């Protein structure tokens, strides 16, 4: 019988990865710049002149067992961060953009209720990118699926291709109500961006996950799925998780536990 | 016969030229007075633009075009050629925007040159932090939250079928 190998031998980590992890751990600590003022550098803050890298894959773990009935904090936080009008306040609710939405599901047989937020699943093989006729729909190197509004013609093929109904079209002029960090406008398709403006700033978290943690539910966990030391990777190793419509083989960036 | 046609053609040309000259001469105003000259407001912040003023006047669109692809596709968010930084310095003191009034920095030249700006269909014309009166600000967020909560309805089986199966 062969002896068991230690875990570290089975999963060889490259020296670059080791160095990166070490440096990340060092910079994650706070730096005091003045009494009472701390400057934090998050592990994934990259220099602004450095492009997003495929060494990182951003992902989210949704723990549906912790997602509270009636709570809508993630949706509110998303609309506040990204400047879209919530459906309840829209003049045309059926046309209103929804970057994230809360679903309350009930099993018709057992009456069991499940709560979960549904948004862009940031597929590794996104159907929206496959169908886009102009190349506006694309996947960034770090796994975030985005729409380049400069090339989007608003044809909505991607909305039809998306199995998760994650995308919306902006039907009306927004009349300069956009956030400076989040350009969005009429005639373009849009969806959850994993708060790309926050990610690039080095926040390392999304508005929805921050709001969920602030509300004490901790149902949303955002992080780098490629980094074996990240919180999300650790949790994904421990928890049984599912991908919605796993049969489509899209390798989703959003994983659900408890559905 | 050919000579007659030729002389007729020459006569016609002379008549038309005279008429055209007379029509042009009847407008005695200088040509530029019909279009209001652009008002170029000095940037509120900063002393010097990121590139020479002459270069920026001719090439700002090229600079912005190259920068936007780097930002959106690659995620390289350098500040130097960012539209956000342009707005940061050039927003008018009165309107707080680069494109709200006809004398604002971007609009003033663009209406003189008759070139439509598409940037502000999507991009905010105001610098960061000036949108305190935005309808979704922190003061009203809790109220919006309540409104949104009321709207949450149970998803029907048919609707869910589209998502789950």
Image (spheres, coloured by chain):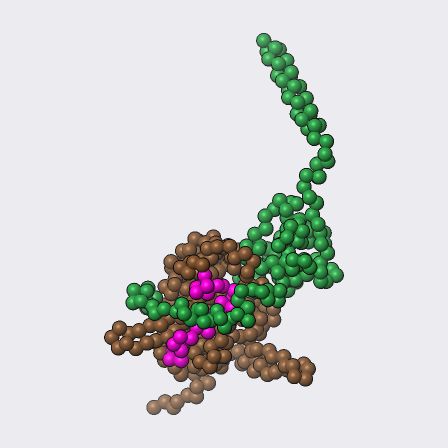
Q: Residue furthest right?
A: B47
Q: Residue furthest top?
A: B1
Q: Is residue B89 above or below residue B11?
A: below
Residue B84 location (% of width, % of height) = 62, 61
Q: Is residue A150 left or right of residue B157?
A: right
Residue A180 visible, this orientation? yes
Residue A26 visible, this orientation? no
Question: Which residue is depicted at the point 38% across and 58% down?
Answer: A160
**Towards the viewer: A66 or B137:** B137
Residue A233 location (% of width, % of height) = 45, 79
In the rendered image, the quadrant that contains the N terminus of chain A is bottom left
Question: Which residue is depicted at the point 60% across and 13% down?
Answer: B5
Residue B144 location (% of width, % of height) = 48, 69
The magenta stretch spans which residues?
Answer: A64-90
Tell me where residue A253 sits by quadrant.
bottom left
Q: Is residue B104 magenta?
A: no
Residue A145 location (% of width, % of height) = 46, 65
Which chain is green in the rendering? Answer: B
**Towards the viewer: B134 or A193:** B134
Question: Which residue is depicted at the point 70% across and 50% down?
Answer: B39
Which chain is brown in the rendering? Answer: A
Question: Which residue is depicted at the point 29% across and 67% down?
Answer: B157
Q: Is residue A78 magenta?
A: yes
Q: Is residue A138 above or below residue A210?
A: above
Tell me where residue A45 sits by quadrant.
bottom right
Q: Residue furthest left?
A: A109
In the rendered image, the quadrant that contains the C terminus of chain A is bottom left
Q: Is residue A236 above or below residue B129?
A: below
């Amino acid at each position: 019988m062969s002896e068991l190998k230690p875990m570290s031998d089975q999963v060889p980590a490259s020296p670059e990865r080791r160095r990166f992890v070490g440096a990340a751990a060092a910079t994650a600590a706070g730096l005091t710049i003045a009494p009472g003022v701390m400057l934090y550098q998050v592990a994934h803050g990259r220099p602004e002149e450095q492009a997003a890298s495929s060494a990182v894959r951003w992902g989210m773990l949704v723990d549906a067992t912790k997602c509270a009935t009636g709570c809508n904090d993630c949706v509110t936080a998303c609309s506040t961060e990204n400047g879209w009008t919530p459906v309840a306040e829209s003049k045309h609710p059926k046309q209103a953009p929804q970057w994230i939405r809360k679903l309350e599901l009930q099993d018709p047989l057992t009456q069991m209720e499940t709560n979960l937020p549904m948004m862009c699943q940031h597929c590794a093989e996104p159907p929206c990118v496959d169908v886009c006729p102009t190349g506006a729909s694309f996947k960034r190197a770090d796994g975030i699926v985005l729409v380049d509004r400069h090339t989007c013609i608003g044809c909505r093929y991607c909305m039809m291709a998306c199995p998760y109904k994650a995308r919306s079209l902006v039907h009306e002029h927004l009349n300069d109500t956009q956030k400076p960090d989040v350009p969005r406008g009429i005639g373009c398709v849009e969806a959850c961006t994993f708060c790309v403006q926050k990610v690039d700033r080095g926040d390392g978290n999304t508005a929805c996950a921050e709001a969920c943690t602030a509300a004490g539910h901790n149902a949303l966990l955002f992080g780098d799925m490629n980094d074996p030391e990240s919180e999300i990777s650790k949790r994904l190793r421990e928890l049984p998780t599912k991908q919605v419509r796993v049969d489509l083989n899209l390798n989703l960036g959003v994983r659900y536990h408890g559905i | 016969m050919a000579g007659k046609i030729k002389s007729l053609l020459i006569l016609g040309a002379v008549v038309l030229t005279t008429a055209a000259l007379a029509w042009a001469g009847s407008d005695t105003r200088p040509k530029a007075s019909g279009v209001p000259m652009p008002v170029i407001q000095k940037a509120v912040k900063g002393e010097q633009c990121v590139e020479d003023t002459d270069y920026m006047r001719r090439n700002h669109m090229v600079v912005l075009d190259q920068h936007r692809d780097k930002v959106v596709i690659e995620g390289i968010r350098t500040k130097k050629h960012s539209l956000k930084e342009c707005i940061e310095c050039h927003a008018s003191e009165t309107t707080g925007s680069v494109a709200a009034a006809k004398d604002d920095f971007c609009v003033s030249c663009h209406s003189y040159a008759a070139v439509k700006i598409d940037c502000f269909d999507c991009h905010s014309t105001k610098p960061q932090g000036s949108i305190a009166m935005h309808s979704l600000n922190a003061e009203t967020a809790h109220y919006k939250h309540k409104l949104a909560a009321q709207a949450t309805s149970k998803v029907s089986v048919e609707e869910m079928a589209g998502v789950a199966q």
